[in-house]
Amino acid sequence: MGLTELAAVLAVTGAVVLVVRGWDVRLVLLAAALVTAVACDAVRGRLGVLTAVVLNFLATFSNEKFVVPICSAMGFAYVLRHTGCERHLVLLLTAPLRRVRWLLVPGVVLVGFLVNIPVISQTSTAVCIGPVVVPLMRAAGYSFPTIGACLLLGASVGGELLNPGAPELLTVAKVTKVTTQEQVSRYLPGPVFVQLAVSLAVLWVLSRWWEKTPESPGTAVPESAPEPPPEKVNFLKALVPLVPLVLLFLAGPPLHALDVPDAWVAAPKDGARDIDLYSTRLIGLAMLVGVLVAMAVTPGKARDGVTQFFAGAGYGFANIVSLIVTATCFGKAIEGAGLAAALGRLITDYPDLLQPLAAFVPLAFAAVSGSGMASTQSLYGFFFQPAVDLGHDPTAVGALVGVGSAAGRTMSPVAAVTLMCATLTHTNPFVLAKRVALPLLAGVAAVVALRMAGVV
């Protein structure tokens, strides 16, 4: 191992320690990127890595590929919460659970998974289903840590990967030129559903054991009030969260049932359409249409709809885009230090490691950084060329990276969705992260094993 690789390893180790000790993830990743870059340039006697990190910071900070889909999706999520549309979707999905209580654990996870598909944001998913499912499960006698684990797994296990608007898919699409709609219809259902099925099954088994053990000191709060009677579902409002999802599927392959004029999204240059720009803005347009529909079906709250949209967009930039910016800088520094090349050589020497590493390396990075999007953006490029060289479909490898990143985010005690679930259930985020870790690791291991066997 050379001096530059050693500097990178030390920076990664230091970053892990500081994040575990509670330091801000963005500060840690940016500092680690700068330290690694300076050390590499000092060893080589010339500026190079530091320049790349700075340029990457500025480019990612203003990258439309992230800002438009993430901020518009978060704006849409805020409007859904403001208008109550997301709540009616949750009420519709949880209605059967009120009559079949023994299915509460898998039911809550599935509800979170389904809501996360149109909402995309894991934190927003937890916020919208928490007030409904927490009292429901508490009234059935479940402990808060178990409720929090179900809420966390459902909201974050990877439902957003089945939405063509997910930013992770744009990262893969930019490199492979495979549209997000095709990724969702062809590449992702197998790995995502295997991950969901295995992790859910393991969590369900573990929950039966957890509930035989008294709650740990400090996790319980005074007994909740009895579960309130269910609200009447407004089916029109319940359908509003699905509007952008339906539009994106109709506009993309294989349906192509909806023709969105280029002039509305991205006018072609020199007669050729910029697929990346078109897809990015199409997502933003779909979210805006969803906002208008939400305001139309709730005219009493329409006045503040635009305010809520921009509040959500600001939240998305401050809490999600910022993390992607610092994580990509960290990834660029690691790449400049030579670790990416070393990983490529390792995969070339041991080809069977490609798919396990494509899933578990992003998992580890996401667990440290708390962001699945940042992990995918930073690390997918490390696996693209080795996949091509070995004759693997790089888009299929991208699906593994996405599933691994989602699992790592879910088991991260510093992820925003983990912190939100801990707040909603009065538990420690480290307790929740520990409870979902084994189910998620089992799920990712199953995905990798079946992929290597050619099943998914």
Image (cartoon, rainbow, N blue to C red):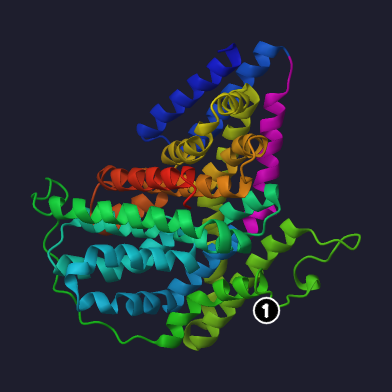
Whether 413 is among the magenta residues is no
Q: Which residue is depicted at the point 63% across and 66% down?
A: 283
x and y percent of residue 13 in the render? Answer: 44, 24
x and y percent of residue 27 in the render? Answer: 50, 35
Q: Is residue 98 among the parts visible in the rendering?
A: yes
For this rendering, which residue is in front, 283 or 321?
283
x and y percent of residue 279 in the render? Answer: 69, 62
Give the residue type that dot 1 points to. Answer: Ala
Q: Is residue 103 above or below residue 177?
A: below
Q: Is residue 123 left or right of residue 260?
A: left
Residue farthest along the right direction in this orientation: 270
Which residue is tagged 1?
A: 257
Helix, strand or loop under label 1: loop
Residues drawn in magenta: 46-68
Whether 48 is among the magenta residues is yes
x and y percent of residue 278 in the render? Answer: 73, 63
For this rendering, which residue is in front, 360 or 131?
360
Q: Which residue is depicted at the point 46% across and 41% down?
A: 366
Q: Is residue 156 among the parts visible in the rendering?
A: no
Query: Magenta-highlighted stretch: main secondary structure?
Result: helix
Q: Which residue is depicted at the point 79% across and 58% down?
A: 274
